[in-house]
Image (cartoon, rainbow, N blue to C red):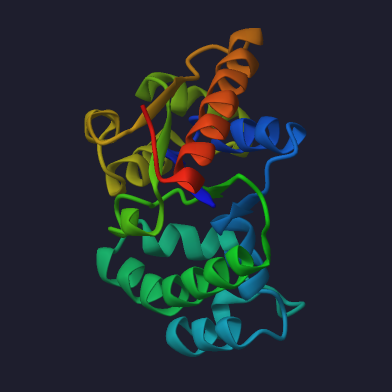
Amino acid sequence: MLKIGLTGGIGCGKSTVANIFEHLKVPVIDADDIAHQLVAVGQPALARIALEYGQDILNKDGSLNRTRLRELIFSDARQKQKLEAILHPLVYQAIQTELKKLNAPYCIIGIPLLFETKMTHLVDRTLVVDCPVETQIERLKKRDAMTIASIQAIINSQVTRDFRKAHADDLIDNSKTDDRLAESVKKLHNFYLSLSTCQEKRVCE
């Protein structure tokens, strides 16, 4: 099965692209969804996070205070590294488990930090969703009501736009929200289907 790593900067529209692939009946494994499940109330990873960062990282109902955690890790690189050391091995283990359940020509694996975590070896191709930094900022201000300083801190913690574009096997321009996005995904869908056939036959023109 062909494995496509879907990535891109925050606010670039990775989830929108993943949803279009899902509408085309393509299996999608989302690292963010897995991470959210891992830190649900009662999960061992949440207990480890509370032990590492203190009980004030939790809401009154015992759930993770995501806003507090985000502020903490993006203001201190060491705190970010601690969180990644807890979650990333568990996330990638879960991805491998999900892959074993699939039977399809190809699948999409959404990994926002695919380049940052140096996990490109897990996929056969990388698909980058791209838009200008200014667009990222505007979208995040509307979506999450974040301050520009907070948004910029997250953007700065990720690889640059130029780096992603230079290392992408495939690129989707999501600068504007219009019908062209769906058309771009459909073209890639057909391309990936042909590649998966080649992979099965071990022969490509």
- Report the side of 128 relative to 115 (left or right): right
Q: Image height check: is 68 above or below 61?
A: above
Quarter placement of the C terminus? top left
Q: Image height check: is 48 above or below 132?
A: below
Where is residue 117 drawn, in percent x and y?
31, 60
Q: Which of 37/185 is in front?
A: 185
**Residue at the image point whose x is 33% and y is 71% from the top:** 79
Where is residue 74 drawn, in percent x and y?
36, 56
Where is residue 3 drawn, in percent x and y?
49, 49
- Report the side of 53 relative to 165 (left or right): right
Q: Image height check: is 167 above or below 38?
A: above
Q: Can residue 4 be seen in this view?
A: no
Q: Can residue 201 be seen in this view?
A: yes
Q: Hey, which quadrant is residue 156 in on the image?
A: top left
Q: Which of 196/182 is in front?
A: 196
**Residue at the image point whose x is 52% and y is 63% from the top:** 68
Q: Hey, which quadrant is residue 163 in on the image?
A: top left
**Residue at the image point whose x is 47% and y is 44% from the top:** 201
